[in-house]
Image (spheres, rainbow, N blue to C red):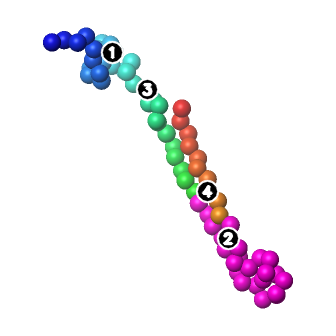
């Protein structure tokens, strides 16, 4: 029993299959993830040790291109 609908079967225009080419909504042509972290050393000076010893800094960068 034909329903009159096609879901992903064949081309929209069989004489021009290139017409169906293109980017999908989830296309990410380029994708890069970068992470970095640093922990400060244990300082000998009491004041500096209290303020700055064993502190952690980190960052994340996500770069993408596409539609």
Q: CA distance from mark 3 to mark 1?
A: 13 Å
Element assignment for label 3: loop
**Reading the chain from its start, which is encountered first: label 3 or label 4?**
3
Question: Circle 2 sits on which residue?
Answer: 56
Question: Circle 4 sits on which residue?
Answer: 60
* The N terminus - image quarter: top left
Q: Quadrant of residue 44?
A: bottom right
Question: Circle 3 sits on which residue?
Answer: 22
- Indicate the position of residue 60 as horizontal and vertical percent values: 61, 56
Element assignment for label 2: strand
Marks 4, 1: nearer the viewer: 4
- Indicate the position of residue 3 as horizontal and vertical percent values: 23, 12
**Reading the chain from its start, which is encountered first: label 2 or label 3?**
3
Tell me the magenta residue range.
Answer: 35-57
Number of numbered discs:
4
Q: CA distance from mark 1 to mark 2?
A: 56 Å
* The C terminus - image quarter: top right
Q: Quadrant of residue 59?
A: bottom right
**Reading the chain from its start, which is encountered first: label 1 or label 2?**
1
Q: CA distance from mark 3 to mark 4?
A: 31 Å
Does residue 65 sit above or below 25 in this rendering? Answer: below
Q: CA distance from mark 2 to mark 4?
A: 14 Å
Residue plotted at (80% across, 77% down):
51
Q: CA distance from mark 4 to mark 1?
A: 43 Å
Q: CA distance from mark 2 to mark 3?
A: 45 Å
Question: Circle 1 sits on which residue?
Answer: 12
Marks 3, 4: nearer the viewer: 4
């Amino acid at each position: 029993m034909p329903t009159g609908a096609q879901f992903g079967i064949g081309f929209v225009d069989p004489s021009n299959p290139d017409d169906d080419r293109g980017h999908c909504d989830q296309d990410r042509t380029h994708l890069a993830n970068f992470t970095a972290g640093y922990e400060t050393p244990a300082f000998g000076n009491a004041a500096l040790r209290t303020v700055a010893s064993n502190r952690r800094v980190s960052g994340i960068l996500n770069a993408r291109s596409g539609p």
